[in-house]
Structure formats: structure tokens, C-alpha cells
Amino acid sequence: MSPPDRPPRPPRLFPSQVCFVVDDVPSAAEDCVARFGWGPFQQFTAPVDEAEYRGWTGRKVTDVALGMAGNVQVELIHVHEGRDPVADYQAEYGIGFQHLGVGCRSRDAALAHLVSLGASPSMQTEFTGIRIAFVDIPTGPAMFELLEATQEKEDAPEVDAQTASSNDARTSKNGSRRSDARIFEIDRATIVTRDLEAALSFYSQAFGWSDAKAARTTLR
């Protein structure tokens, strides 16, 4: 008798980035360097003349800064013109934690996996070197941004700096590891949710956690 077919393994997802909407990207980047030792930040403005989002078309202009906090990439972002998932969050909530960047080997496989768990696609786009999908997750309002690198970092233009690895960002020009006692490393993200059990179930299935347990504590 042949053994029963095993269900396919879910795609491996690895959180690698936290994104914050800010009022002023250059000022926020300077503050992160001065207060927390994060960075250095690579800053750029990303204009898109013919952007499309949920029936809207038009020009979109976004300020972005990318830097490292330990092993985690920090993205600071502000949409000046146009619409996209970040602009929607910005209009409704103002500044704050907007999405968790999630690396994956296949954007489409990761997206199908998350949709099977109750998430819904918000926007998909591609640049040279990277494929992106924003995903509304059932525990929102923060989102997931799926990031699939499609070529080596050195071949990608500056706007695609999200493909840079944490090792590259923490290595000095002479190849030695950067050592800075002042740096505050990011090692966790706190997600606000209306339903703790539902959030724990979603994240456990999304990332393949086998031993996740909820610990309830009332903070005073």
C-alpha cells in the first residue's frame, strides 16, 4: 500500500522589514540615526507618472528612506501625491506602522497561501529586480508587503533598494562588520488587533509557527 499523499508545504515567508508612515522622511531618517543609531539611510523620491490603484489612475510621488536596525530593515515613507495602499493608510490613520515587509521566493505562491488564510490582495507591482504585492490581512489595519527579489542587488536601480540584504547594510566599505554600541536593534513588532486568538492563528499559519502560544497580560 502506498503512503498517503502529504499536503504541500506552505511557502517559506520571512519577515524582513518594518515600514512606518511619517510626516517628513528626511527629518525622520535623521532622528532615527541620532536617537537609535539606525542606518545609514538611503533616501530617494519615487515618481510614477501612470500609477493605477483600485480604479484610480494618475501620477504618484512617494518619498522613501531605507536603513537597517540590527537584522531588520526600516522603511520610512510618505506619499505626497496619488493613491496606493500606503496613501490610503496615511489618509485614514496618519503616521504609524503601515506594513510588515515579508520576503518570499515566489510572490504568487506566497499570495495564494495568504489568501487561503483569509487575506486579500490590495495591489501588485513590479520593478527591475523585485516583484511586490500588498496584502490586506484579516487582523489589520497594518498590511503585509510581499517582496520577491528577481535579480542580484548590483543589477537593480536605486529605487529597488528594498532588495538589499541586511548583511550588506551592516558591513563597512572595507568588508568588516560594523560595531556600534549605541544601536538599538529591532527584534520584534507589536501588532494591535481586535481579536488576539484570530491574529495568533493567522500568523501561526502564515509563517509556519508550530509552538505559538498566547500569553495574556493586563498592563497597568
Image (tube, grey):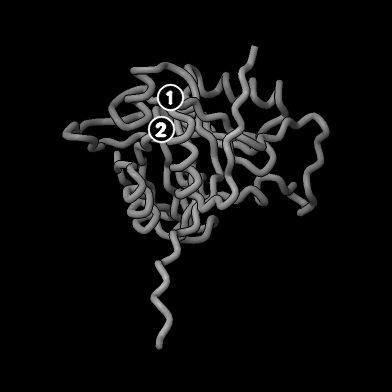
Secondary element at image label 2: loop
User: Which residue is tagged 2?
Assistant: 139
Quadrant position of the N terminus in the picture: bottom left
Q: Residues within 10 Å of mark 2 (few under 14, many from 20)?
A: many
Above or below, comparing residue 123 to residue 80 in the picture: below
The answer to which image quadrant residue 150 occupies is bottom left
User: Which residue is tagged 1?
Assistant: 194
Q: Which residue lies furthest to the top in this view?
A: 220
Which circle marks residue 54 in the picture? none
| Kind of residue sitting beneath label 2 | Thr
Q: Position of residue 184 (x, y in %)?
A: 73, 30
Q: Where is residue 73 in the image (x, y as percent from the top left)?
A: 59, 40
Q: Looking at the image, do the residues carrying marks 1 and 2 touch, with CB atoms under 8 Å apart? A: yes
Front-most of residues 115 and 74: 115
Q: How far apart are the two marked residues, 1 and 2, measured between alpha carbons?
A: 7 Å
Front-most of residues 1 and 41: 1
- On the question of residue 127 being in view, the answer is no
Residue at position x 51%, y 45% in the image: 161
Quadrant position of the C terminus in the picture: top right
Residue at position x 50%, y 18% in the image: 24
Residue at position x 49%, y 46% in the image: 102
Residue at position x 50%, y 32% in the image: 19
| Kind of residue sitting beneath label 1 | Arg
Q: Which residue lies furthest to the front in this view?
A: 1
Residue 7 left/right relative to 204: left
